[in-house]
Image (cartoon, grey):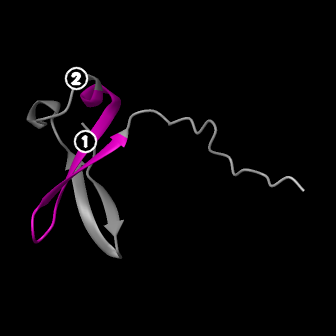
Amino acid sequence: MELKKEIRILGRRFEVEPRAKESLKGITVGEKLSYRSMMAHTKARPCCSLSPRRAIPLHGLAPSRASG
């Protein structure tokens, strides 16, 4: 069982907890397996957050060098 975690958005703290894969609608099976879903409750409405299970490689995203 995962422990509850906390995130900050614009300086405000929100407690997040894991969300069951079965409760996610509208995403593919591959996405369900590739991402962790967390649920946060704000005053206005609930918010679902997805984070990758593995590190995402950043190939080709290095800043370009100006030739000179």
Q: Quadrant of the N terminus?
A: top left
Name the side, left or right, on which 45 lies relative to 68.
left
* 42 to 27, vertically: above or below: below
Name the side, left or right, on which 56 lies relative to 16.
right
Residue nearest the viewer, comparing 22 with 17: 22
Give the magenta-colored segment's residue range: 31-51
Q: Which residue is mark 2?
A: 29
Q: Residue at x 25, y 41 (%)?
A: 37
Label 1 residue SS: strand
- Separation (CA) of disc 1 from disc 2: 13 Å
Q: Which x, y percent locates residue 51?
A: 35, 43
Residue nearest the viewer, comparing 55 with 25: 25
- What amino acid is at disc 1? Ser
Taking the view exactly as shown, the residue that stands out farthest to the front is: 68
Q: Which residue is mark 1?
A: 37
Please tell me whether the stretch drawn in magenta is mainly helix, strand or loop: strand
Q: Which of the marked residues, 1 or 2, is nearer the chain's N terminus?
A: 2
Q: Quadrant of the C terminus?
A: bottom right
